[in-house]
Image (spheres, helix red, strand yellow):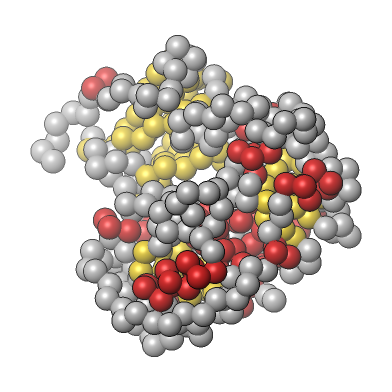
Amino acid sequence: MSRADVLVSADWAEQNLGQPGIVFVEVDEDTSAYDKGHIAGAVKLDWKTELQDPVRRDFVDKAGFEKLLSSKGISTDDTVVLYGGNNNWFAAYAYWYFKLYGHRNVKLLDGGRKKWELDSRPLTEQKTQREPTQYTAQDQDTSIRAFRDEVVAAIGNKNLIDVRSPDEFAGRLFAPAHLPQEASQRAGHIPTAVNVPWSKAANEDGTFKSDDELRKLYTEAGVDPSKDTIAYCRIGERSSHTWFALHELLGERNVKNYDGSWTEYGSLVGVPIEKS
Amino acid sequence: MCGAPVQDDTLDRTLPASVDPATASIVQGRVVRDGEPVPAAYVRLLDGSGEFTAEVVSSATGVFRFFVSPGRWTVRALAPGASGSADVDAGSGFTETRVEIG
């Protein structure tokens, strides 16, 4: 796995718009961003309403994912190019999610929607029409998904990377600073976790930093490359971005994303928590 | 737009029901270029050490809002071909600022 296998540049994307076998998919934190303008031919995925089970706290199951992608007109063998706002954070989450269900050819547009806009590249409000497909997913690849018991067992044994902002890590805030602070559980972090805010992996224009810069970032923070790693944040999207940097760009093995993240861990009874 | 001056003190101060106005600390304001509000700018919140904390896109009237902890923050805005920043000292309640870009 190398950078060229998992990231595409804005230039490449613009040259490959409308190519058969390549589907652009926009995933934004602000789920209305797509409707105000998107890359021509791109389809929209709504992380809130389409990727989450409507009742339980979990992802849609395999059959649900197959139904969703079929309805979007995405084929099993298509190359899916994901992009979104805010340094691709929800696009990186979708990337991890596609990998979880075994999609083979999936890439991120480096810099996402932000770089695209800052470069003044064209967006359209024209609706994208794609014929429905018969999409086939794989069983979840849990080698990239961590659950709570594994996280508790990892304290002091594996690398735990808390990728939230320093204020959230220290327990001063419950949520990122652009969201209302509306959580009721305990604030703080998992003992022995190091704090490497996810955004340190990105440049100001949303593109990923170089492999050398990324390696230095995690090593200097105390991440031991000889150990397995679990990344977490608040609900598992920012940590997908870090999972992408470690697993897909740097090629580290045994990196998992804990999607339960702080909203689960900080609500568990009896588990240890550290503050500041 | 006809060049009317931007009135930062007309910003909406309505909060979501889940936010306690007694304890919340809010940094909000407008992105402005040549006296005009800038919609769809990327507005980044940096902490006292210059570390990125959060990012939003400015509204149709150039407005942004962050929920922070009290302290020193920098708001940096990016638009095609222009950028700028403003420092703020946030206390409790609303702290308002204007980010000029050029």
Give coordinates of residue B11: x percent, y percent.
Answer: 27, 25
The answer to whether A213 is drawn above or below residue B98 in the figure is: below
A135 or A169, nearer to the observer: A135
The answer to whether A54 is drawn above or below residue A61 in the figure is: above
User: Which quarter shows the N terminus of chain B?
Assistant: top left
Q: Residue at x 64, y 62 (%)?
A: A244
Q: Residue at x 59, y 63 (%)?
A: A96
Give coordinates of residue B82: x percent, y percent.
Answer: 37, 48
Q: Residue at x 59, y 60 (%)?
A: A208
Q: Is residue B51 left or right of residue B91?
A: right
Q: Would residue A196 be seen by someone viewing this image from the given angle? A: no
Q: Residue furthest bottom?
A: A20
The answer to whether A254 is drawn above or below residue A266 in the figure is: below
Q: Is residue A182 left or right of residue B32?
A: right
To which quarter of the image does residue A26 belong? bottom left
Give coordinates of residue A178: x percent, y percent.
Answer: 46, 36
Query: How many numbered marks appear?
Result: 0
Q: Residue furthest left?
A: B2
Give coordinates of residue A2: x percent, y percent.
Answer: 68, 75
Q: Residue at x 61, y 28 (%)?
A: A185
A136 or A104, nearer to the observer: A136
User: Which quarter shows the C terminus of chain B?
Assistant: top left
